Image: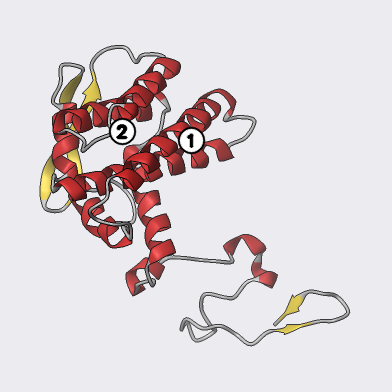
Amino acid sequence: MKKEGSLLLSDYAAEIAATDVLNPNDFNPVLQGLYGEVGGIMATAKKNVRERTAYPGFKKAAEEEFGDTLWYLAAICRRLQIPLEDIFVEAANHGDFKNVGAASDITNGALAYIAVPVTETASLDATLVRLGQSAAALLGCTPARNDLIAFARAYLDAIHAAELAFSEVARGNLRKARGTFLEPQADDLIGLDFDSEFGSKNSYPGTSKSGQSTRQWQELSPMEGGIHR
């Protein structure tokens, strides 16, 4: 899977499936989980839009809440044996959206279609209310396909109103969920630099003098409390 750019929802659904450790025959935990995460969206999305300059961390928090909600939606679709991709395609196949062609960054397809809202975006408060209402409609029984589509449409509207990128939301959730429930794979570790924020004296070098990747021996000075090579 690509580390950035567009993300196929089918790829997301396939890679996130292994993190679903809940009872596959019980809808209540995933329905209640989704409803709870929508509450988290309402709290963080408003702060992200209104107070982002004061606290940029709100954007990451909002992305995480949207990502956790997507996880539960994928779990519901899995239990109903409905492809997550189909739900979102039908959600965007609506008069409120139009398909705009774009040069694709996926090698299997040169052209992509992006569902773009055609009407002026409703207020953030209004979109969050609709998201909450559509989440409530899923509670109490086995969700109907039309209710899932209505929720997915409200979800897309809310992401747009919150000024977030769907691919970043989905990819961030993949990293979080797979990092929590699964043993890391080699591909998951490529490009990670765990101590890059600590400066050259307090982090491991990426390469040795010979150019090979290594972790050099370092010793801690008890007098200075620093790391010396």
Quarter of the image for residue 161 reads top left
Q: Percent position (x, y) of residue 157?
A: 32, 24
Residue at x 15% of width, y 21% of height: 94
Q: Is residue 149 above or below residue 85?
A: above
Depth check: give the residue in front, 108 or 171.
171
* The C terminus sits in image quarter: bottom right
Q: Percent position (x, y) of residue 137?
A: 28, 26
Q: Residues within 10 Å of mark 1 (few under 14, many from 20)?
A: some
Q: CA distance from mark 2 to mark 1?
A: 17 Å
Q: Does residue 116 appear in this view?
A: yes
Q: Which residue is mark 2?
A: 139
Residue at x 43% of width, y 38% of height: 37
Depth check: give the residue in front, 142 or 112.
142
Q: Is residue 153 above or below residue 212?
A: above
The amino acid type found where label 2 is placed reads: Leu
Q: Does residue 102 appear in this view?
A: no
Q: Residues within 10 Å of mark 2 (few under 14, many from 20)?
A: some
Q: Which residue is mark 1?
A: 40
- Coloring applied to the structure: secondary structure
Please tell me the numbered disc located at residue 147.
none
Q: Earlier in the sequence, mark 2 or mark 1?
A: 1
Q: Is residue 56 above or below residue 194?
A: above
Q: Percent position (x, y) of residue 215?
A: 56, 83
Depth check: give the residue in front, 102 or 43.
43
Left/right placement of residue 229 relative to residue 211 reads right
